[in-house]
Amino acid sequence: MNIYSVSWLELTVLVPLAGAVAVAVCRTDATRRRWGIAITGAALGCSLLAWIGHETGASPGGSAAWELFTRAFGFRLFALDGLSAPLLPLVALLHFLTVLATTGSNHTRWSVPLLLAGEAVQLAALGVRDPWPLTLFLALGVLPAYLDLRVRGMATRVYAIHAGLFVALLAAGAVLLGAGASPAVGCVPLLLAVFVRSGTAPFHLWVPDLFEKASFAVALLFVTPIIGVYMAVRLVLPVCPEWILQALGFVSLLTAILGAGLSIVQTDARRFFAYQFISHAAMVMVGLQLNTPISLTGALCLWFSVALSLAGQGLVLRALESRFGRITITGFRGLYEHSPPLAICFLLTGLGSVGFPGTLGFIAAELLAGGAVGANPLVGVVMIVAAALNGIAVVRVYFLLFTGGRHQTSVPLGITGRERFAVLVLAALILGGGLYPQPGVESRHHAAAVTLRDRQERLGSPVGAKHE
Amino acid sequence: MNHYTESLAFLVVAAPALLLGALGVASLLDRRWSEPETSRLIRWAVAVALISALGLVAGMLATGEPRVVLDLGNWVEVHPHGAGADHPGYHFQVKLVFDQLSIPFLLLSLVLCGTIGAFATRYLHREPGFNRFFVLYASFVLGMVLTSVAGTIETLFVGWELVGMSSVFLVAFFQERQAPVRNGLRVWVVYRVSDAALLLAAVLMHRMIGAGDFDKLLGGGAWPGGTASVSESQALLLGLLLLVAAAGKSALVPFSGWLPRAMEGPTPSSAVFYGALSVHLGAFLLLRAGPLLDASPTLAVAVVVFGLLTALLGFLTASAQTDIKSALSFASLAQVGIIVAEIGLGWRYIPLVHLLGHACLRTLQFIRAPTLLQDYRHLENAIGGRLPRQPALWVRITPSRLRVLLYRLAIERGYLDALLALLVEKPFVKLFTWLDRLDRRATDSLAGENRDESPVAWDHVPPPSGNGTGHHAALGHGHGNPPHTPNDE
């Protein structure tokens, strides 16, 4: 027996699930918050062990001697591969840092239980490989955000319409493909479901709506892992005909520009963030469409970079909201003096999201732009323009929030220790991954090659030959 | 290349990189160096880089090597395997080239950065943003060094971006005022256009020759020799992208409007950025890409035209400025335009010497700018009367109506800002504001809400003290309001 005899993969899912139930019955906010930190920290630890076990071969695919689910039900539900193994700690980390950076002022009765439930479902979706359980967990994943809206007494209609559409399309696609329909028929509803989940135009309206109405933490954690991309890689890419991928690329390209342009003219910080997500998620999608080893590697790298960068940006905005309430960006606020680390982190994560040199996103953007130009120069040009617009949007909001005046207050507004830890961890990952990118790129290239080989075997056509 | 030159070449880049790391990490951790420590760090880092560069030059002179190439290998490489294994893979090569172009520019950068760094530690003594200034300054030094010695377009791009980022945040250095911040944003917008063009050129270069190595693109001979390894049309395409990149960075027409705006920054950064180094980066890039200009006469003509237009605009506008930093910045622009035109004409050493001389002179003028009135007084006291103010010959012989027209053109800085605002900024903002309105309406109709009638009680913007409460921000004239939500989360 050794440390990998325990199924860390299963525990990664079960710990937050059990934690959600346990925390729901806690009586005070402080207790819930403490338990929330402990549980998300434990989930992060389990996910790291599952990842390390997979990478080192000690527990390939997350397999272990003591698998609770296998013993109870007789079949193995959870399994890892090169694509999903690093995603688990990523998602667990985002949840841990978000709960850690939560202050007393931005806490409600159900915040932590919903976050934990959402974490369990997202980790479960990333931890399964079979289409049916994946479909189930993806469908369940829309519930925490819906419940958050209900708990807060906010209008749910826009979100509910999109979530319902997503679940219906997902189910239709799974049923059609399961029933042996041709990939072209089965892929269309799945592709539309991917569009809805990723906020691709014209199915993007729920994203700003959710950010305006839900708690920032729930909305942030619902979107930043960009589960739609995972869904596309797992369910759509392996079986999807070329023309459908091209449709995905075209719509995503338009969305990337639309999101970037709209984020420049926003007057509310949450809506700015929502459109930044829409644009970045669409850029990752474009990389999937190009369907070449280099572009897919770039897309998978960009996915990581965007998830970390947007989470960092989101945490900074949330920290500001906990001090000032909802943040408008119609005028200069001059907050730099009160908390330089928050300003620096916002800038760093913002520049990271647009692929500034030295950050995690740089090589990803280079790979993706290279793959795009190789496939179609126009696609490359549009992607570079979208990245430039996103860069303008980020710096504009940085200036509006942190400069242009000097905010006067009689109470201290400096960063707290927990917030500092959260932003420093994200900054370290963004910079560390940017300065030493080779392991990350190699891992994503391997995952891309496996995905494309799978596609090649299923469709029986050479991959990427036309492009490169 | 022996171990000696290799180590020195490495130190040239490593010293500023370590400087940035030391200052940047401390800032991130909110543990700042004291003023004397910062000053020492700057001094030592620039001194080590400069001495290494001089040692390298001495070694090259001694051995008669016309160029030293330090290939640091691939920072990132993706080897083809698995599905689609026939793809060419990807590599990000880090290669530094020390030749007759890069070494003069490198020495110029280090000498000026060292001088201005020493000047700035005194100029900004006890300034609240002292630490911020030097973090950005360290980024600039590293960016300049990388750009100067870049042997691949990717390495050049990294330096280019670092220079751009540090420039923008130094323009907005006095960030408690709105004007510097607005100007910083304006500069950033132009730089993003420039960077996008350079990135596209980098990607296209990979596509055309399978690498970002300048040696493969430009023939690999010692500068200024070399022959482009691409066809004329490819040279034109790549060259035009590089020209756009250069135009953004060097404020060539039609991007000249940002240059006087950049003078909002502290004098030391204005001097070294817009008087000396940053403003010449575009010309440096064109000098590096010289063989592309030789391969495409159309490109060469375009470079000459842009250069001359810029020179003309710079000359006219400088004549009508009423503050010394703006006058100097446009005078710089006129010279940069001439340098660019010289490059387009096929000369190589003349523009290089012109660039070096102009950078030194202009730096001196910029750092003397705050004492201009005193200097005038000294001169007038010395000659015992007013300084002569006779109009130039061309002013005297120009008809008065034409003079008025030219004056209007000069005072409006060639109407370039107005044109860009009219043709680019306003349509862009209008289009996306309209799309945003559409989005909001579509969301409202789905939600069954009417946002325009909803209360806007949430809209309480805590006013920053002093100026500017309620001003609308550049590029974002808002409309519509998000719905009221209780204190969120």
Image (cartoon, coloured by chain):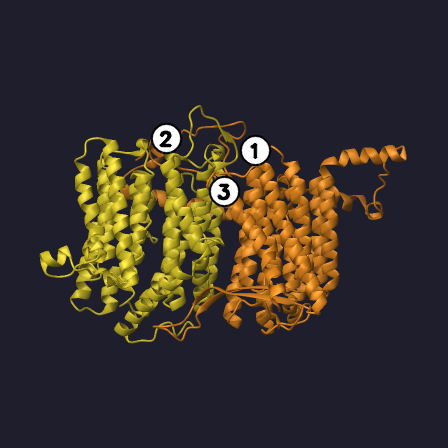
Chain colours: A yellow, B orange
B16 horizontally vs A370: left or right: right
Residue drawn at x 74%, y 57% as measured from the top left: B354
Dot 2 lies on which element?
loop
Residue extending furthest top? A410
> Between disc 3 and disc 2, whose residue precedes?
3
Give the Cα separation between the discs numbered 2 and 1.
37 Å
**Residue kind at label 3, given as amino acid type:** Ala
Looking at the image, do the residues carrying marks 2 and 1 touch, with CB atoms under 8 Å apart? no
Task: Relative to B245, say whether A402 is above or below.
Answer: above
Q: Which chain carries label 2?
A: B
Percent of width and height locating residue B133: 58, 41
What residue is pinned by disc 2? B456
Q: Can residue A325 be seen in this view?
A: no
What residue is pinned by disc 3? B26
Circle 3 packing at 10 Å, graded few (<14), some (14-19), many (20+), is some
Q: Mark 1 lies on which chain?
A: B
Q: In which quarter of the image is the C terminus of chain B?
A: top left
Residue toward you, B327 or B86: B86
Percent of width and height locating residue B199: 52, 60
Q: Which mark is residue B128?
A: 1
**Residue kind at label 2, given as amino acid type:** Val
The label nearer to you, 2 versus 1, is 1
Task: Relative to B230, say whether A83 is above or below.
Answer: above
**Residue kind at label 1, given as amino acid type:** Pro
> Between disc 2 and disc 1, whose residue precedes?
1
Residue drawn at x 32%, y 42% as measured from the top left: A98
Circle 1 packing at 10 Å, graded few (<14), some (14-19), many (20+), is few
Dot 3 lies on which element?
helix
Give the Cα separation between the discs numbered 3 and 1.
16 Å
